[in-house]
Image (tube, rainbow, N blue to C red):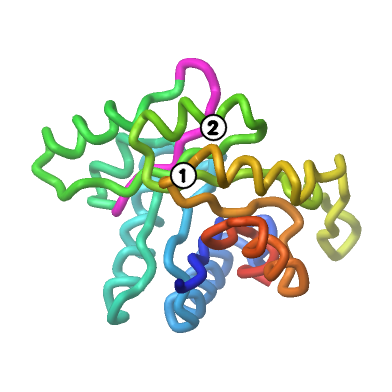
Amino acid sequence: MPVLRYAITDRARVQGEGPGLEAALLRQAENLAGNGVDFVQLRERDLDASALASLARKLLGAFHSHWLGPKLLINSRADVAVATGADGVHLTSAVGELTPADIRDLYASAGLPEPIISVSCHSLSEIPSARDSGTTLILFGPVFEKSISVSEPHRRVERRVSEGIGLNLLHLACAAAAPIPVLALGGITSENVPPCLEAGAAGIAAIRMFLE
């Protein structure tokens, strides 16, 4: 089966300021589309709704220019996803978050096609709820590590903040989530993709691997 590839945006990792920053992010989006990435999650949580919607529309334009371009999912902001006609929404497992049923109702009310809905899970206990809610994809991790991007003079660097939960838990999560596809998340590199697939993952989700 094809390996699903799910890229997550992060403007902090793109060189540039103002319009130059947005242009650089759009160029990266073009690269992702040209390289066969299946999904792109727009995760710029610091942007207000207007700025996020503007960026989403530009990304959709870039993706639609490619045959079988990536599907665009908006992180948490169902209102922006519906307003822009994005392909779907990414949800966290936090209490009070909208449910996949809520998202589907919003899309149906707007006359939009069935949305793609991904949900992030960080423990086995979260898997059954995500699976039974009718989500499209589950992002599980961090498998290898959790890191943050921090500023240093003239550059940004990655700083590990915790160890990953490991391949054994990924394997158990994939079994528990079936038939919902699980994507491995956290510290993913080209070298550790094969063991993730051997553990049962349908693909991988990453920031650094795709954007850098």
Quadrant of residue 83 in the image?
top left
Compare residues 121 and 97 and report the one nearer the observer: 121
Residue on which disc 2 sits: 127
Residue for point 19% across, 30% down: 105
Which callout, 1 or 2, points to the residue nearer the camera? 1
N-terminal of the pair, mark 1 or mark 2, is 2
Residue 98 lies, with reference to residue 26, above or below; the image says above
Task: Classify the position of the N terminus by image quarter.
Answer: bottom left
45 part of magenta stretch: no
Compared to 16, does 107 lie above or below? above
Residue in front for this viewpoint, 62 or 49: 62
In screen coordinates, is 6 left or right of 114?
Answer: right
Q: Out of 84 and 203, give the one closest to the viewer.
A: 203
Mark 2 packing: few (<14 Cα in 10 Å), some, or many (20+)?
many
Q: Which residue is mark 1?
A: 178
- Which percent across, then down, holds residue 182? 53, 50
Q: Amino acid at mark 2?
A: Ile
Residue bounds of the magenta highlight = 87-96
Is 183 left or right of 147, judged from the image as shown? left
Q: Is residue 59 above or below residue 83?
A: below
Q: Residue at x 46, y 44 (%)?
A: 178
* Secondary element at image label 1: loop
The amino acid marked with disc number 1 is Ala
Is 79 above or below relative to 174? Answer: above
| Number of numbered discs | 2
Q: Quadrant of residue 175?
A: top right
Residue density around tag 1, few if under 14, some if 14–19, many if 20 or more, within 10 Å: few
